Amino acid sequence: MTDGNPARTIVGVPKETAPDERRVALVPEILAKLTSLGVDVLVQSGAGMAAGFSDSAYTEKSARVEPNVLAVSDIVLKVQPPATDEIAQMKEGSVLIGFLQPYANAGGIKALAQRRVTAFSMELMPRITRAQPMDALSAMSTIAGYKAVLIAATHLPKFFPLLMTAAGTMTPARVFIIGAGVAGLQAIGTARRLGAIVEAYDTRPAVKEQVESLGAKFAQLGLDARDAEDKSGYAKAQSEEFYKKQQEMMSKWLSASDVVITTALIPGQRAPILITEDMVKGMRAGSVIVDLAAEQSGNCALTEPGREVTRHGVLIVGTMNLPSTMPYHASQMYARTVTNFLTHLLKEGRVHLDLNDELTRGPLVTHQGEILHPAVKAALGAGVQGTS
């Protein structure tokens, strides 16, 4: 492959080993962009099969397919964090790009540092204009918001749209969406396209215009939330008093809704409890809650991560990793963001690190045997959400 020239950088794409993970970090249509930058691509056999991409689809685009890629790859592209045995196989000094769950994966982050892997966590991509094509988290949130509505529509014992039939008029479902970030806005758009009456709430007053532009009503709770957004654009954690008042004010919207979709997440922290058990008791029998914060313990007090449970006549869906349930498009979207970021790092076929560049420094977690990201280092040092 090197034809006598100095060894080219090898980008490796292993098969995901996490349970129920069907995505792949690189898709065939992206290969030409990478190889034009002076790297070779090595894909583990079967890596793309669950997402709908055969081994032959990769070889047709000039990738090599091998049984194992970790030990020989200079750069590893993954979706889920590597397991301990995968980290042990990686070359010392190699580069890893993927979702690393840095605040909840103390053992993995420490192992990557010990292996002297330069690891970039796509969750930590800074929210700046230059980083928008590399925002994997938003890309996956788009899928989660869309799929949450489909799940709700499947389980709800009612039609979503208004139907006028010979048997009478069927009134439309009422959908209440909590959180108008990327996932929430996609959920609003999807629910509206299905014909539901949609209302939405967010602690950030600035998103009111976006909510209304999609045809939904913005719920006014009359709470002072001027400090609800951090400088990166994410919602900030609020005080216990704020959440208590929010719950009280929100109860009337929940009691009038057939579907509730929650999307509130705070990076590195447990998801805030927005729906108490008493609020669930006040909902209509047969209603559905889809909790997109289930992976961080959930926005509903009764959510059981990874399960669907019925409590007080209300179905509460705590399904996790929704993007993996749509692996074809999820892989395409993720691969584009990862490739865009790798393109930023590559200079003449080699990874070049400019630690003065916010785009490089922002998602960098480990480098040269150290945990460099300040927030991750502080969280792991304090044992926040970490397991060693």
Image: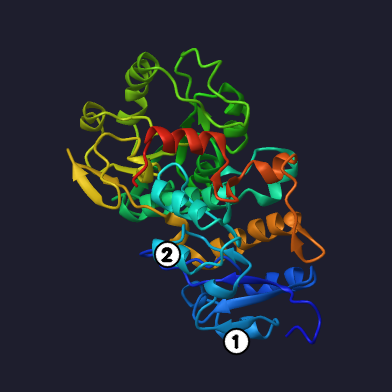
Answer left or right for 304 relative to 147. Answer: left
Which residue reaches farthest left? 312
Q: With respect to residue 252, does 324 lie above or below?
A: below
**What's the residue type where badge 1 is placed?**
Ser
Write down the residue under mark 2: 21
Read off the residue under disc 1. Answer: 56
Q: Nearer the viewer, residue 238 or 328?
A: 238
Estimate how packed mark 2 is, as few (under 14), some (14 to 19) or many (20 or more) residues with alpha carbons within 10 Å. some
Between residue 261 and residue 237, name the one nearer to us. Answer: 237
Which residue is at a point 35% across and 64% down the rendered structure image?
19
The three-letter amino acid code for the residue at tag 2 is Glu
Image: 34 above or below 257: below
Quadrant of the image for the N terminus? Answer: bottom right
Mark closest to the chain's N terminus, 2 or 1: 2
Q: Is residue 264 visible?
A: no
Circle 2 SS class = loop
Residue, x 34% and y 39% (percent of image)?
298
* Relative to 84, 94 lies left or right: right
Up-down relation of residue 3 to residue 368 (above or below): below
Crowding near pointer 1: few (<14 within 10 Å), some, many (20+)?
some
Which disc, if any, is residue 273? none
Judge whether residue 122 can be spotted in this image: yes
Residue 49 in the image: state x and y as whole percent: 49, 78
Q: From the viewer's side, name the closer residue of 153 and 233.
A: 233
- The colour scheme applied to this rendered structure is rainbow
Where is residue 124 shown, x and y percent of the image? 57, 43
Residue at 45 percent of width and 49 percent of height: 110
Q: Position of residue 169 (x, y in %)?
A: 37, 46
CA–CA distance in space, label 2 to label 1: 21 Å
Kindly state the secondary structure of the residue where label 1 is placed. Answer: helix
